[in-house]
Amino acid sequence: MFTNKIRLFIGTIFLLSLTILVNLRLYEFASVALMFIILLAWDYFRSGTLVVAARYFHHKEYDRAGRALREIFKPEWLRKNRRGYYEYLMGGICLQKQDFEDAGKHYELAAQYPLRSVNDHVAALVHVANISIRQGNYDKAEAYLQLTEKHQEKINAKMKDVINRLHQEIKKHTK
């Protein structure tokens, strides 16, 4: 929810208040300040700057979104639902840069974690299939498109149309 600069600023304020409260021997209030410092650090490692990056991503500010995502110290430490969305956003940023190799890797990882909705999960699978078609790996593309079939009743019509077009593209190249 915060950028690292804001987290550092808030943490510094709580640290200063902690030292002042300890010097004044107000240990109950000092423990509350310490609790907030720990909570701020915990939130950084478990949520990161993902909310900020998502806001930039949805406003199509991909460079700023990428910078916000790179502020995350260890993406492996994010919560499961946050990690999936992190990989999804990184895949989208790589796709915008036309780095299809990395985009495919990030979307493959995103599909392994829970995402916000079924449409996001299917979109990650479709992106991997589309990238695989571009790279000429039609078997992999077909496998990922088959994974989307179990969600057919829950996805929107636009996504169904994209899946049908990808199936046609695979048929055209495998004949």
Image: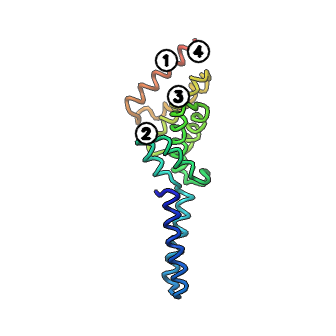
Q: Name the residue that disc number 4 marks.
A: 174
Dot 4 crowding, Cα within 10 Å, few <14, some 14–19, many 20+: few
Q: Earlier in the sequence, mark 2 or mark 4?
A: 2
Circle 3: residue type: Leu
Q: Earlier in the sequence, mark 3 or mark 1?
A: 3
Label 2 or label 3, whichever lies nearer to me, is 2
Colour basis:
rainbow
Q: Name the residue that disc number 3 marks.
A: 145
Q: Which residue appears at 53% of the width and 69% of the height?
A: 12
As helix, strand or loop, the secondary structure at mark 1 comes to: helix
**CB contact under 8 Å: marks 1 and 2:** no
Q: Using the image, tell me which numbered label, if any, was put on residue 130.
A: none
Residue 94 occupies which quadrant of the picture? Answer: top right
The quadrant of the rendering that contains the C terminus is top right
Q: Is residue 168 above or below residue 38?
A: above
Q: Earlier in the sequence, mark 4 or mark 3?
A: 3
Q: Earlier in the sequence, mark 2 or mark 3?
A: 2
> Camera-side residue: 94 or 154?
94
As helix, strand or loop, the secondary structure at mark 2 comes to: loop
Q: How far across and how far down the image is residue 168, in percent?
A: 49, 18
Q: Is residue 21 above or below residue 37?
A: below
Q: Which residue appears at 49% of the width and 71% of the height?
A: 13
Q: Earlier in the sequence, mark 4 or mark 1?
A: 1
Real-space Cα separation, disc 2 to disc 4, in angstroms: 36 Å
Real-space Cα separation, disc 3 to disc 1, in angstroms: 12 Å
> Camera-side residue: 133 or 31?
31
Q: How far across and how far down the image is residue 150, in percent?
A: 48, 34
As helix, strand or loop, the secondary structure at mark 3 comes to: helix
Label 1 or label 2, whichever lies nearer to me, is 2
Circle 2: residue type: Lys
